[in-house]
Amino acid sequence: MPPHIGNLTSLCVLTKFIVGKSNGRITELKKLCDLRGQLHITSLENVEVADIRDAGFVNLKDKPGITELHLEWAEADERFDDLRNPSHEEQVLNSIQPYQSLSSLSITSFGGRKFPSWLGEPSFSGMVQVQLWKCRQMTSLPPLGRLKSLKKLSIGDMSGVKEVGVEFYEDDSCFSCLEELEIGSMGEWELWAWSKGLGEDTLPKFPKLRQLRIENCPKLVGKLPTFLPSLENLFIHDCPLLVELPKVLPSLTALSIRRCQEAILRSVTNATSLTSLKRLEIKECDKLVSLVDGEEGVLPCNLEVLDIDGCPKLKELPSGLKDLKSLKDFFIEGCKRLVSFPAGGLPHNLIRLRITRCESLESLPEGIVCPSNETSYLEKLDIYGCESLRYSSNGKFPYSLKTLRIHNWTPQFLNTLYCGLSHLTELHIEKCPQLESFPGKELPLPSLISLTIARCQGLRSLSNHMQDFQSLQKLKIEGCLQLQLFPEKGLPNPKLVSFEIVACRNLRSLPNQMQNLTSLQSVAISVCEGMESLGEGCLPPNLTSLRIRECLNMKQPILEWGLHRLASLRSLVLDVKSTGGDFISFPDDDGFLLPTSLTYLCIWGFKNLKSISRGIQKLTSLEKLSIWWCPKLQSFPAEGLPATLECLEILSCPLLRDRCLKDKGGDYWPIISDIPCVDIEN
């Protein structure tokens, strides 16, 4: 801290005070009586013994304006624990007693063995939030239940606490206003003694608690409070010995269970009180075999979201799934032993279904792909990484389907489903190695807006049936190594707005007649080593964004691209490998190469570039200029950079960097010092 900061006796706002051994002694705070709002005192291990002798060395009792107080010691380290003095730290915390108007208190890495008597005093009637973390010498918690206004409590990383006892509560009226409780990383915590054993099981110890989060408590075996009438959100993560949830949870709407025993789920599926539960998340429960007891077991009837992920031993789903009339979202992922869905399929009201990484799954649920035309509300279907899946040859998707993501499907199967795709707006096809041409003649998709074809290594062409996609706005092709040419007529999709090609190494050029795509605004071509030109028609006239990167064999020089004619172009990203030539100076002295509409220009990997030319001044709308990996670049134009420039980035340009740094006496510092944001490597 600045020397003698305590002399600023009119200081009202000091959000952080770092205790030092010379400057910033904690006694400097004594005279700052007008402080208000937040105060964070850190490095409290530096408080000297001599300071403690002065009972009012901080004098927070006389600072009623401080409403939020954070107290922090250096984090405990086993190598230096012997150097810490628990008694000393207890005296420090005891002497820092704040004014009773405090509303929020946080204590971190306190090394004492007991908390001060003032912590939990009922006189702190306005305290609404308390956080106690990393106080690892503690064996018990303070009586925070006395704080009648407390709404949020967070406790964690106290390895000395084995039992949360009744001293935490004080009496039956405790925690009367508490709404959020978080207990985490309590490695030795075994028992939650929330009752004195006098038949008080049904008393509401936390009558207003809405959210309870218990995480990473590997030894916790004791029961949770039985009666939580207001609890809405419950998170139990990494508590492998906990086997039972509270019995009375009438308001619970969301439950998340991660890395816990199978037994804890039985208290979910057997509970009759979970009538309000809408979201159930079960993740990484390695021993989970079945969600319910027996085939007839049921899940809470009002579920809207069921999310199961990373349960490798799960073999079956309950037959009652089809009866969950409110279920809208069903996600099942990473369940390697799941072979099939129960008879009867899934509820017809389902809107989103995701099945991924279920390697043994052999068939889809009834009603998803079937000969019948039953009423369905399914809008989004995502099937990925299910290599054992077998498909019906006469099935079809429901007409309600709008988004479909498929993985490792055959072209024959796609062609048999065309009847069900008339309303599809988004299609993502990935890792379908047998797919050689797309689309097939029997795959009309009149409503399709977005199409992605990724990692289909057998794809050689897009067929002339692309003209059937008259609503297409977004097209992305990625990792299709055999793709060489587009249809002769180009892309007859008048509404196309975005076009992206990534890692198609044998593709030679962009589609023909791109000048006819008057709606096209964004073109991005990356890692296409075989690209030789941008095509005969060159670039669409209303382009606003162009990104060309790592096209190693580009022969068409940038001068022939017609960039200067693109009056709407705002963003341009180029690397030298994609410009059909090398540059010593860029863009050009006369400023005719690039359009004046540009607001963002990024040049990348121009290894022989030595200067930015004076033509940059003609870019009268330029707001951001990024120059990356240009090792020989060393000069800006004498005329300077455009006055409109708001951000300049320079990365891996060592010669230019040194000329721009103020502390190295860089001669370009006066030129760039008025730019609001300058980001220079190192």
Image (tube, rainbow, N blue to C red):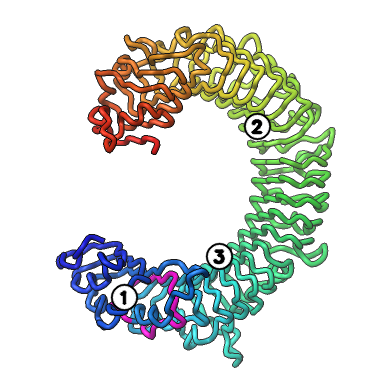
Q: Where residue 461 sits: x, y (%)? A: 70, 17
Residue 107 counted in the magenta span: yes
Location of residue 514 (image quadrant):
top right
Q: Residue at x 46, y 20 (%)?
A: 606
Q: Quadrant of residue 453?
A: top right
Label 2 neighbourhood size at 10 Å, few (<14), some (14-19), many (20+)?
many
Of the image marks 3 and 1, the number of the one nearer the N terminus: 1
Instruction: Tell me: residue 671, above or below residue 81.
Output: above
The reply to whether the magenta stretch includes residue 457 is no
- Residue located at (61% from left, 19% from top): 529
Q: Residues within 10 Å of mark 3 (few under 14, many from 20)?
A: some
Q: Quadrant of the C terminus?
A: top left
Q: Position of residue 662 (x, y in %)?
A: 27, 35
Q: CA distance from mark 3 to mark 1?
A: 45 Å
- What residue is pinned by disc 3? 233
Residue nearest the observer in this picture, 312 or 584: 584
What span is colored magenta in the figure? 95-118
Task: Identify the residue under disc 2.
Answer: 427
Q: Nearer the viewer, mark 2 or mark 1?
A: 1
Mark on residue 48? 1
| 406 vs 29, nearest the viewer | 29
> 487 or 31: nearer the eye?
31
Whether the residues at callouts 2 and 1 have beta carbons within 8 Å, the answer is no
Task: Tell me which amino acid carries mark 3.
Answer: Asn
Residue 113 in the image: x percent, y percent? 46, 81
Residue type beneath disc 1: Glu
Q: Main secondary structure of the magenta part?
A: loop
Describe the element under mark 3 as helix, strand or loop. strand
Asked if disc 3 and disc 2 are in contact, CB closer than 8 Å, the reply is: no
Residue 424 quadrant: top right
